[in-house]
Image (cartoon, rainbow, N blue to C red):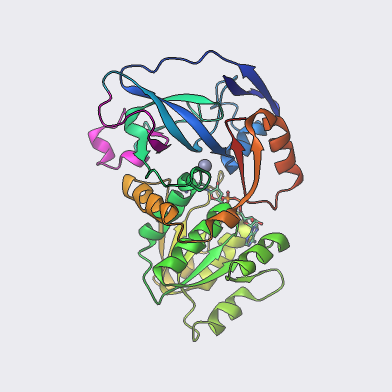
Amino acid sequence: MIATQYKGNKNFAVIDKKIEEPKDDEVRIKVAYSGVCGTDVHIYHGMMDKRVSIPQTIGHEMSGVIDVVGKNVTNFKAGEKVVVRPLDDRKVKPSDKGFNHICEDLKFIGIDSPGSMQQYWNVPAFVLHKLKPETDLKLAALIEPLSVATHDVRRSGLVKGETAVVLGGGPIGMLVAMVAKEVGAQVIISEVNPTRIKMAKDLGFDAVNPTEVDLVAYVKSKTEDKRADVVFEVAGVQPALDIMCEVAGIRGRILMVAIHGDKKPVDLFKFFWKELSLIGARVYEKEDYEKSIELITENKLPFEAMITDVQPLSKIQQVFENIDKNPSGMKVLMDCSL
Ligand SMILES: NC(=O)c1ccc[n+]([C@@H]2O[C@H](COP(=O)([O-])OP(=O)(O)OC[C@H]3O[C@@H](n4cnc5c(N)ncnc54)[C@H](O)[C@@H]3O)[C@@H](O)[C@H]2O)c1
Ligand SMILES: [Zn+2]
């Protein structure tokens, strides 16, 4: 089979590898599609070399079909369509309070251990979620990032009739916006990239560029001066941190989705003055996957538009080089049958 390996320093190898038998508690998946995540791009750029053991097969946004099950696996069988929730929580402790998805010793499959950018992938059965036979496997590769969005919206407590401002219309922000709209909220996307603004508008979203439009005045004009009930920070930059406390209205909830690798200044006075809440949101729980599987299977939202390119797995090097050249694209999938 073909497997890919990140070798360090913006280099991938495509190797011919022996197909391995799954261990007793594992299944072997024939991977259908593997999506490229922002984290994979960070790995490619060498920013996670301390964490990723090189050479490593990366990838965690995938869909596939079970090929073989290990002898202790009773709840799955060959031929079933599945996705992986790539969280290895086997080292969960009582002090994690039952929040397995953010337990202290969590390992992320595809970063800390081999991932899905290969034709066959052995994983422990407990990470699997079953799909319906009719589920489209291309769309199903979006279930992992969509589950980030369903988790964020659930954590926010957003309800119908509220206004949500999404700061950053990248893949995650766009999926957050879709899920927020599905809840029945009024959604405003703030994005600086003209291609992504156009895409958001084409999908029917109210999208503005905060470097051209006064975002606070705009949000006020759409909310009878009340401003946003919920702000999703999905841009990961200082200007978004500066404006999040401004666009949030009284008792607004701010969801911190973006990963800020270093300490940044935030106007804490606004938290006191408007009784704001800051809520962290990290990955997803089982129920977020179940909600995403339902949304994808029913193809309820404009998910197809999220997939801006599909390339053979064997072209992995060009895929990552092209992402660097065209950062406006949304989700690139690799077809793992090729
Ligand atoms: N919480 C989690 O578990 C989780 C999971 C996945 C990703 N993330 C994080 O979510 C963030 C978004 O992920 P992504 O893949 O969509 O990344 P991305 O970089 O593609 O998207 C960020 C977007 O923000 C836009 N932007 C930049 N400056 C802006 C500004 N001043 N105002 C508004 N928008 C601005 C960019 O143009 C870009 O489109 C990243 O920080 C990522 O690390 C978190
Ligand atoms: Zn991801």
Which image quarter is the C terminus in? top right
Looking at the image, which is closer to me, 314 or 86?
314
Residue that lies at the very extreme toward the right in this rendered image: 325
Q: Is residue 280 visible?
A: no
Which image quarter is the N terminus in? top right
Q: Is residue 318 visible?
A: yes
Residue 61 percent across, percent down from the top left: 51, 39
In magenta, the rendered stretch is: 73-101
Q: In this figure, what is the number of numbered marks?
A: 0
Looking at the image, which is closer to me, 317 or 119?
119
Q: Residue at x 50, y 16 (%)?
A: 19
Looking at the image, which is closer to me, 125 or 29?
29
Q: Residue at x 41, y 15 (%)?
A: 21
Residue 13 percent across, percent down from the top left: 67, 21
Residue 87 percent across, percent down from the top left: 39, 35
Position of residue 196 relative to residue 41, above or below, is: below
